[in-house]
Structure formats: structure tokens, C-alpha cells
Image (cartoon, rainbow, N blue to C red):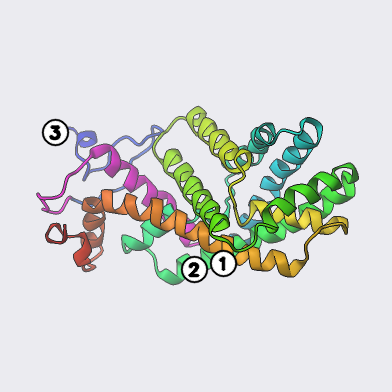
């Protein structure tokens, strides 16, 4: 057998470089194995390890950059919606922000579900590393978005009315079952984007996925804690917002919970269940116990 045919041995990687070291498969004959999913699982771990080892300053800086880049998408959205009156075209324009995230290698808080959670579940990082990534990235996203909101207000006063109208749609929705459902869908959509990025080696395919999910988020007006907060910051900065900082904070906490639910339960948890054979391999390689929920007898 050639080394590249054996998943337990290093072989050619997806980009022509070395494949990350893969632990040998454990003997769990009752569990189905799909090689393409297992290779994707190993790539997720390879990407996630360094993300969870960043220092606080690096985590916050990466998050701030992500907030700044996404804010350019918010600017494009406001401009297109003000000129066309179409939220669907505005959603397409917003994809500029997601393209910036992809090519600029920064990240949003909601991108920290599938990859880092998988690393922790495999026993290759600690829960506190995950919490540092989440808190630092979210703080950076909001700080970068707040700065950009100030600059948008100063540079484009003609967009003030559109910013107030767009932000009011989200914040005035309040803490209702509908706003929570829209937040759950947004969290699931972002995590789906991460899955699609991990499932292909084509940069073109990743760009298409980024544009598509950006359109779904902004064009269909799903509720995203960071993206919509940048809209809220821009509206508040005009001095004409129909809501206050307290309204934003209550909405933010509610939507954040919905994003977490969608990203972790609807997408990440199901992916871990589907890849549980490989998860068992990594936990065994790290000398960790296997939760009963992952074993065949629990099916």
C-alpha cells in the first residue's frame, strides 16, 4: 500500500504539501467510516490547533480585523440598499465582507464553532482555550466594528437614514421566538460555511460559498450578533436611532444565544456524531476516555 493510501500515514496533502499526521484507526467495526469525512476531520484539527494556541493579543487582533473587514460589507450593503431599495441586492453586496474574511484570514466569533470545538472534543486543546478564543474574537469583532461604524458615519452622512432603518429592523424585533429562530438559522448558516470551506481545496469554491452564505445572511435578514451590531453601531452614531444602547444590549444577548444554538447544535454536534469514529481515534491517541455517547452500544 502506498503511504498516500493509508490514512494513518503521512501522504500528499490537499494543497500538494504533507498531509497532517493521522493517528491509526481504532477497532470500532460497528461505526461507519467515510474516508472523505475523515480526511476533512483531520484537516479541521490541523487548522484548529494553532487557532487555539494564540495569545490573548493575537486573538483580539484577529477578531478586530474580522470586524473591520465585515464592516466593509455593511458599508456596501447600506449603499446598495439606499440606491436600489432591494435587500436582496444589498445582501449580495454584503458578500464583500465575507470575501475579505476568507482572503484576509481573519474571523468572526461565529466561525469559532465547528473547528475549535472539534479540536477540544478530540482532546487536543482545553475548554479554557476555546473560551479565550470566543471571548477575545467577539470582543475584537465588536471593537473593530464600532471603529468602522464611526468612520462610516463620518465619511458617508448620506447613508445615515438607511443605517437607522436597517438597524431598527433587527433591534426592534426584540427578544421574541421569531428573532431567536432567525438567530439560530444565522448561527447554523455560518457554521455551514465553515464546513463547506473545510470540504474543498478549491479557492474558487470557497469564494462561491462565502458569497452564497453572505447573501443568505444579509439578503434574507437572518439575525447575526456581530454583523447586525455593526449596523446598530452605525445607526446609534448618527444620533437619530429609534433605539438606545440598552435595547441593543438586550437584543445582542438574545441573538448571541441563538447563534450559539444554531452553530453548536444544528451543525457542529451533528458533524461530530457523523465523524465519531475518527473522533474516537484521536481521543484514543491522546490517551483520553471515550464518552459512552460515542460508542456503538449507545446507538
Residue under label 2 = 131
The answer to if 35 sits in the magenta stretch is yes
Please provide percent x and percent y for residue 172.
70, 58
SS at mark 3 in the image: loop
Pointers 1 and 2 in contact (C-beta within 8 Å): yes
Circle 1 crowding by C-alpha within 10 Å: few under 14, some 14–19, many from 20: some
Q: Quadrant of the C terminus?
A: bottom left
Vertical side of 12 occupied by 173: above or below: below
Q: Which residues are magenta?
A: 25-54
Q: Quadrant of residue 138?
A: bottom right
Residue under label 3 = 1
Residue furthest toward the top? 204
Q: Residue at x 71, y 44 (%)?
A: 74
Tell which tag, 3 or 2, sits nearer the viewer.
Answer: 2
Please provide percent x and percent y for residue 42.
32, 47
- Residue 208 visible within the image: yes
Residue under label 1 = 135
Tell which tag, 3 or 1, sits nearer the viewer.
Answer: 1
Is residue 239 rendered to the left or right of residue 116?
right
Amino acid at each position: 500500500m502506498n503511504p498516500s493510501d493509508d490514512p494513518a500515514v503521512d501522504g500528499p496533502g490537499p494543497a500538494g504539501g504533507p498531509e497532517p499526521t493521522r493517528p491509526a484507526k481504532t477497532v470500532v467495526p460497528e461505526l461507519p467510516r467515510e474516508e472523505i469525512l475523515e480526511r476533512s476531520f483531520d484537516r479541521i484539527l490541523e487548522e484548529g490547533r494553532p487557532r487555539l494556541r494564540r495569545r490573548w493579543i493575537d486573538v483580539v487582533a484577529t477578531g478586530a480585523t474580522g470586524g473591520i473587514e465585515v464592516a466593509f460589507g455593511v458599508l456596501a450593503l447600506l449603499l446598495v440598499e439606499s440606491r436600489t431599495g432591494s435587500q436582496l441586492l444589498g445582501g449580495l453586496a454584503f458578500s464583500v465582507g465575507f470575501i475579505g474574511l476568507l482572503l484576509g484570514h481573519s474571523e468572526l466569533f461565529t466561525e469559532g464553532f465547528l473547528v475549535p470545538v472539534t479540536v477540544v472534543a478530540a482532546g487536543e486543546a482545553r475548554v479554557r482555550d476555546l473560551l479565550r478564543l470566543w471571548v477575545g474574537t467577539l470582543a475584537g469583532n465588536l471593537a473593530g466594528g464600532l471603529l468602522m461604524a464611526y468612520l462610516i458615519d463620518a465619511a458617508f452622512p448620506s447613508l445615515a437614514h438607511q443605517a437607522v432603518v436597517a438597524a431598527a429592523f433587527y433591534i426592534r424585533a426584540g427578544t421574541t421566538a421569531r428573532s431567536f429562530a432567525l438567530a439560530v438559522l444565522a448561527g447554523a448558516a455560518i457554521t455551514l460555511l465553515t464546513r463547506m470551506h473545510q470540504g474543498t481545496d478549491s479557492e474558487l469554491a470557497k469564494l462561491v460559498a462565502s458569497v452564497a452564505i453572505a447573501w443568505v445572511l444579509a439578503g434574507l435578514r437572518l439575525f447575526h450578533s456581530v454583523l447586525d451590531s455593526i449596523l446598530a453601531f452605525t445607526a446609534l452614531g448618527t444620533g437619530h436611532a429609534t433605539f438606545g444602547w440598552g435595547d441593543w444590549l438586550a437584543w445582542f444577548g438574545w441573538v448571541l444565544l441563538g447563534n450559539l444554538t444554531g452553530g453548536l447544535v444544528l451543525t457542529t454536534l451533528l458533524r461530530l456524531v457523523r465523524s465519531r469514529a475518527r473522533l474516537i481515534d484521536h481521543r484514543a491517541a491522546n490517551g483520553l476516555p471515550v464518552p459512552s455517547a460515542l460508542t456503538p452500544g449507545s446507538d
